[in-house]
């Protein structure tokens, strides 16, 4: 295959946070702190460590905010204007229309699709858990919409319909090993940013914007990945995760924008800027992933 240029637009400047070592450390900490556990005798030492990591996590998010602050500050703060801007991100947001995805659909080999999926699976923060964490103490209408979205993620009470196990099925089918040590830092950074916004209440509205823009932009990418998996011979059951998100997220996005985002902006215009920042952070981190994936796959 001919060598293709790597898009340098999202190449980060020198940063203590946008590095392999920092993102791996933050990813390990996130997995440990969010896993169910038991009381420990050294809980005070663990708490001291957590405070240190929370400060670093905050610095990481503030650096991401600084990158997109000017753009977010110019976003309309009335409901109609904000929704129009937000929905336009599907076409104009960072990383949208990336050539990686048509290539995955039409040209990537099984091994190349395996590597891509390994990166995505290891960097998966768990949409269901992010929604559950974000909805705490939100106003009624947004809270109800996030509850409906979570219920869909949970298969509406049917284990066979849960989205997480569908992803696990594909992990088994492709025999990938989605561990932090095998994952590029850009993918870890995306998951770490999503986790940071969902777990800290000062970024709750950022998280609403970030999750909403996933629902908005995921269908096209999911359809391309599903096409690639179909092309290499995976069954309907094995492709179900991406086939489902190529269709279901279109409805989820419309519902999220109408029932969660609009009421928040109507209730407090300041939430528009926060949600814009969250959406732009999510898309910028995603664009960095796509650049890194192309650099690896098209080398």
Image: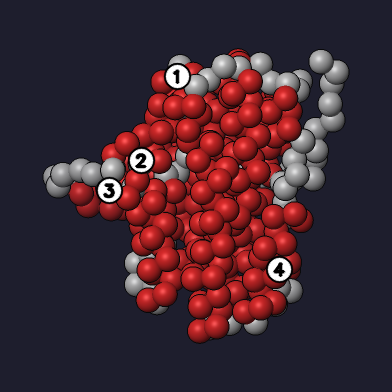
- Say whether disc 4 or disc 2 marks the residue closer to the N-terminus: 4
Residue at 62 percent of width and 64 percent of height: 277
Residues packed near mark 2 inside 10 Å, few (<14), some (14 to 19) or many (20 plus): some
Q: CA distance from mark 4 to mark 3?
A: 35 Å
Q: Position of residue 63 (x, y in %)?
A: 61, 57
Q: CA distance from mark 1 to mark 3?
A: 25 Å
- Say whether disc 2 or disc 1 marks the residue closer to the N-terminus: 2
User: What residue did someone put label 1 on?
Assistant: 173
Viewer-side residue, 272 vs 15: 272
User: What residue did someone put label 2 on?
Assistant: 161
Which mark is nearer the camera, 4 or 3? 3
Residue 29 appears in the figure: no
Q: CA distance from mark 4 to mark 2?
A: 33 Å
* Left or right of 47 on screen, residue 273: right
Locate the C terminus by quadrant.
top right
95 vs 175: above or below: below
Q: Position of residue 273 (x, y in %)?
A: 62, 73
User: What residue did someone put label 3 on?
Assistant: 157
Residue at 81 percent of width and 15 percent of height: 1
Which disc, if any, is residue 85?
Answer: 4
Q: Position of residue 20 (x, y in %)?
A: 57, 35
């Amino acid at each position: 295959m001919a060598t293709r240029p790597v898009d340098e637009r999202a190449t980060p400047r020198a940063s203590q946070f946008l590095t392999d070592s920092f993102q791996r450390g933050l990813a390990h900490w996130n997995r440990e702190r969010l896993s169910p556990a038991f009381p420990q005798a050294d809980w005070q030492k663990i708490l001291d460590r957590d405070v240190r990591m929370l400060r670093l996590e905050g610095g990481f998010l503030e650096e991401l905010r600084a990158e997109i602050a000017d753009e977010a500050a110019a976003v309309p703060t009335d409901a109609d204007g904000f929704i129009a801007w937000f929905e336009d991100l599907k076409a104009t947001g960072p990383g949208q229309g990336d050539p990686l995805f048509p290539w995955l659909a039409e040209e990537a080999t099984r091994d190349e699709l395996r590597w891509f999926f390994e990166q995505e699976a290891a960097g998966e923060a768990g949409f269901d858990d992010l929604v559950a964490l974000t909805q705490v103490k939100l106003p009624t209408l947004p809270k109800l919409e996030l509850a409906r979205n979570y219920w869909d993620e949970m298969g509406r009470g049917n284990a066979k319909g849960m989205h997480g196990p569908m992803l696990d099925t594909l992990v088994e089918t492709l025999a990938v090993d989605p561990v932090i040590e095998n994952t590029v830092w850009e993918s870890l950074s995306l998951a770490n940013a999503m986790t940071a916004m969902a777990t800290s209440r000062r970024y709750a509205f950022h998280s609403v914007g970030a999750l909403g823009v996933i629902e908005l932009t995921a269908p096209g990418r999911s359809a391309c990945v599903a096409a690639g998996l179909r092309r290499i011979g995976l069954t309907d059951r094995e492709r179900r995760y991406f086939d489902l998100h190529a269709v279901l997220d279109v409805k989820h996005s419309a519902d999220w924008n109408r029932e969660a985002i609009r009421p928040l902006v109507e209730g407090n215009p300041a939430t528009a800027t926060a949600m814009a920042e969250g959406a732009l952070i999510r898309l910028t981190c995603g664009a960095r992933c796509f650049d890194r994936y192309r650099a690896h796959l098209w080398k």
